Image: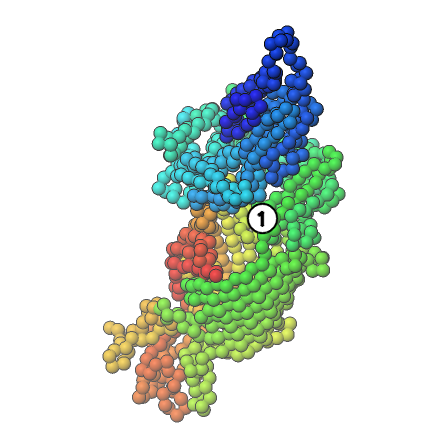
Amino acid sequence: MNRLSKTGLGPVICNPAPSRGPIRLASLLCCGSILAGLPTMAGAQEASPAPAAQPTTAPAPAPAARSNVIRTITVVGAERLEPTTILSYIRLRVGQEYTSAAADEALKDLGATELFANFSIRNDAGNVVITVTENPVINRIVLEGNERLKADKILPEIKLSPRQIFTRSKVRADVARIIELYKRQGRFAAQVEPKMVQLPQNRVDIVFEITEGPKSKVRQINILGNEKFSDGQLRGEMVTKQARLTSFFSSNTSYDPDRLAFDQQKLRQFYLTEGYADFRVVSAVAELTPDQKDFIITYVVEEGERYTFGDVKVDSQLRDFDSDVMSTQLPMKAGDFYNAKIVEDTVEQLTELAGRYGYAFADVQPRFNRDPENLKMNITFVLREAPRVYVERVDINGNTLTQDKVIRREFRLAEGDAFNSLGVQRTTARINSLAYFQENFEVTQTEGSAPDRIILEANIEERPTGELQFSAGFSSIEQFILAGSIRQRNFRGRGQTVGLSVNYSQFSRSAQVSFSDPYIFDRNISGGIDIYRRDFNSFNFTGNERNTTYEQATTGFSMRAGVPLTEYMSLVGSYTLNYDEVGLDENLFFSDLDGDGTRECDPLRAGRFLCDTLGNRLSSIVGLSLNYNSLNSRVRPTRGKTISLSGEFAGLGGDQRFVRFRGRGQQFWNVGNSGFIFSILAEGGTIIPLQERPGAGVDDVLLTDRFFLGEPQFRGFAIRGVGPRILTQTSQLDSFGRPILDADGNITFFTDRNQVRDDAIGGRNYYLGRAELEIPLGTGARELGLRPSIWTDIGALWGVEQPILTVNPAGIPLTNDAGEALFQVPSTNTTTTSPTQADGSPNIRLIQQNSNIRELFLGNSPSPRITAGIGVNWNSPFGPFRIDFAQTIRRVEGDDERRFTFNVGTQF
């Protein structure tokens, strides 16, 4: 508080209170009033009483008048600030007359600086002394109690920081700012208590004690005035949701004033799409509940009448567009209910159509003529060419590693080009697809030096593009998986990608080195090379037991080069050279077939299809693919399409001769603004052999070159669970090891899928289709990385030559009375139906003595297999996780179903 000495020469001391309101002003005025009496009081004390002999002598007034003139000004107490700096803040000067008003103004000036904790002014016979106590320096800022809002979110938002001068006004402002941050998080009960801890050398620690309080939820949303749509239907259109047990993962149940305004727009948008052109929100009020914990929101609406489209036409002022023809092709017709979304889509389609015909500056303006009497909305789409605007320059800011050319080459507009909004959209999509910069990057536009000039700015924030990853996980396909990789997607800031990866699992091992450059020698030509070694152990299933069959080791390299044909289309050529080594475990699958001591692949143990695949071979493959890609993102697309057509020719040297064709297309749609993402996929392929392989039942395309279909690309079936396969059934034996016969005298076989050996042999042709709808969740679930979806798959695999099954030495299949393939060898004698060696002894190609086997060839059919199910993608703490539950709708005999699949890994 301000106080003034009671003596005429006493000091005038000001110690400002925390608040600077009316009390401070009154105190200063009081100081001024008292100071006004100082000259008079001083004059009374200095005058001597007149001598008795001279009673009429009056005291001279001159000395008293001279005592009000400032002779010197001294500053006391300054530590960091120079005295001359302090004097520059006030208007008192040597030679001026010292008055109470001047002292009051000086006190106000010192207080306005907010540099001093205490300050005072006193006048000692013209010698003015200013005494100050400087505000302390902030040593550090400490936040206590903040759990929901971390320090890295709060500290950048407040004004105080270490090494600054402490001021009370900044503290009050920072308290208000922190509370505002918590309100945005929906915590309206948050409290902040600032405290100051004194330290030596006039330093302080500022401590903000935060009580976060509970999150304020939206307990109830009331809607008044709606008659056409129910409260529940309208609440479903809003972003804000009522707090319920079912909304546990949603953060949209918290109250947010900004979201309240957005929900009003959502309501209006919904009604406009339903034809209610006069709809308006009369009021929207949010009230705290009596317990001060939650909010109740009340909307008052006026729906109005429902309109239909009236006269809808196009007025084209462009030379190449006929108004009458375009009017007949509009999506809305007279009599249809009015829909504002269709109008917006039509404007966008007309603008894009004009842009394709070279009118980059076409301006489409819908003119509305409302007929309230007949409840009709007449619309005229005026199509005209807007004034041209040119790109003055392109500015790129924020890139420290990435070279300018990497960003500039993605721009579809350059300096001097005519401005085109479609070009800006495409530029934004291409830069986002690089995945080098922040999410949701956008190219901004600012005015240029003239009205017809515009500046394009790319304000980027680089993110790390180097990846060093070690993974461990478990897959329903590969069992335990270990993997390590190092990759730089923006090598030396040139946009090049280099990588090294090593993978190991129970059934596969691989190592690969790769390099790719989207612009070789800064030309619009992409290229890359991969060098790899892949070891793969194929398998079959006997029940749930997975058995290794053949081993394939591939060593090779692949080169590719591509050129763009259009903005969305490119042509890519490739060359692949592979050396394959395919082998079998001789102890399990080899036998002395001719009795000469030479062990060969035994078709009865391994299968004829597998014996034909053994050996080493060189494959020289030339490929060409035509690609179309208009996706808005390569990472997680929401709209656009991708199409790929490819052909490969094996025969430019090497041992293999075939032609392989593949096609694949996928389309994404963002369903309205609801967050649903719908996609469809279709793909297929065929292999045409160019050489014949001798032998009955021998397919001209080797097993290792065929297509396979199943998990994970065809959900609802096991890996390689669709298409041609051989099921090897064995006979049931009694306690004496003899085959069990049925009532008709036929041998009984194990038919349970868990007791049958299952060998998938692939096919020459396949097709696969998929439709999937990704369902949006609340913000909380999205932050957890949860993305559920519902889907249906359809596909088939077929076209392989039927292999020779169980045969006798003459190559004739053996059958029982029912015509089923049969092979039987008693342990002590031979029969006419039992293959023997030349000396009459039992053939040693037996899988089991005194046993019978039956091989069934199934699944070789183009008939569609159909499955449907639900799945969830989750970016879990253990790594990417995918889980699917499938139901088979249609299958073919022999297909191997699987209802539940998952895949998970982790990084450390």
Answer left or right for 99 relative to 259. Answer: right
In this view, 886 is above or below 238: below
The residue sitting at 31% across, 88% down in the picture is: 829
In this view, 770 is above or below 84: below
Residue 549 % position (x, y) = 44, 74
Q: How is the image coloured?
A: rainbow
Residue 301 % position (x, y) = 45, 26
The residue sitting at 62% across, 60% down in the picture is: 497
Residue 13 % position (x, y) = 55, 27
In this view, 12 is above or below 145: above
Looking at the image, the residue that sits furthest to the top is 56
Across the whole image, how many numbered discs are drawn on residues? 1
Circle 1 sits on which residue?
438
Q: Quadrant of residue 606?
A: bottom left
Answer left or right for 322 relative to 773. Answer: right
Q: Nearer the viewer, residue 123 or 795?
A: 123
The residue sitting at 64% across, 74% down in the picture is: 653
Q: Nearer the viewer, residue 585 or 784?
A: 784
Q: Is residue 267 visible?
A: yes
Mark 1, other Cα within 10 Å: few <14 / some 14–19 / many ≥20? few
Amino acid at circle 1: Gln
Q: Secondary structure at mark 1?
A: loop
Looking at the image, the residue that sits furthest to the front is 53
Q: Quadrant of residue 187?
A: top left
Q: Is residue 277 visible?
A: no
In this view, 614 is above or below 296: below
Q: Nearer the viewer, residue 532 or 791?
A: 532
Residue 569 % position (x, y) = 64, 53
